[in-house]
Image (tube, grey):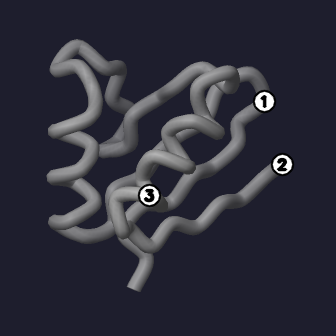
Amino acid sequence: MTDLHFQEQGSVWLVHPITPRGEAWITDHTSVRALRWFGAIEIDRYFAQDMFNGARAGGLDVRIDTA
């Protein structure tokens, strides 16, 4: 089952936690001040690849959708 869903939105990416494990990873690896959008966090496109790689290295199942 997918833990995190990465969704490209032009110059920003949305990272949707799908499972409690995905939510825990987001909580542990992002600032409490991270911008939230309907449960997802919004990140700059320059950080999306690093966050994706970090989540995979942490053993999470991730999915990515590009525009």
Give the percent coordinates (x, y) of residue 30: 28, 28
User: Which kind of residue does numbered mark 3 sit on?
Assistant: Ala
Give the percent coordinates (x, y) of residue 48: 60, 35
Residue 67 got which mark?
A: 2
C-alpha span from label 3 to label 2: 24 Å
| Disc 2 crowd, CA 10 A, few/some/many (<14, 14-19, 20+) | few
C-alpha span from label 1 to label 3: 25 Å
| Disc 3 crowd, CA 10 A, few/some/many (<14, 14-19, 20+) | few
Q: Secondary structure at mark 2?
A: loop
Q: Is residue 47 above or below residue 66?
A: above
Give the percent coordinates (x, y) of residue 9: 71, 36
| Quarter of the figure that contains the N terminus | bottom left
Residue 42 got which mark?
A: none
In which quadrant of the rendered view does residue 65 lie? bottom right
User: Which kind of residue does numbered mark 1 sit on?
Assistant: Gly
Identify the residue at image location x=17%, y=39%.
27
Q: Earlier in the sequence, mark 3 or mark 2?
A: 3
Q: Earlier in the sequence, mark 1 or mark 3?
A: 1
Q: Earlier in the sequence, mark 1 or mark 2?
A: 1
Whether pointer 1 and pointer 2 mark residues with C-beta atoms closer than 8 Å, the reply is yes
Residue that badge 1 annotates: 10
Q: Is residue 23 left or right of residue 50?
A: left
Q: Secondary structure at mark 3?
A: helix
Give the percent coordinates (x, y) of residue 17: 33, 56
Q: Residue furthest top?
A: 33
Q: Is residue 39 left or right of residue 50?
A: left
Residue 57 got which mark?
A: 3
C-alpha span from label 1 to label 2: 7 Å
Identify the residue at image location x=16%, y=66%.
20
Identify the residue at image location x=58%, y=67%.
63
**Is residue 58 or residue 2 the one in the foreground?**
58
Q: Secondary structure at mark 1?
A: loop
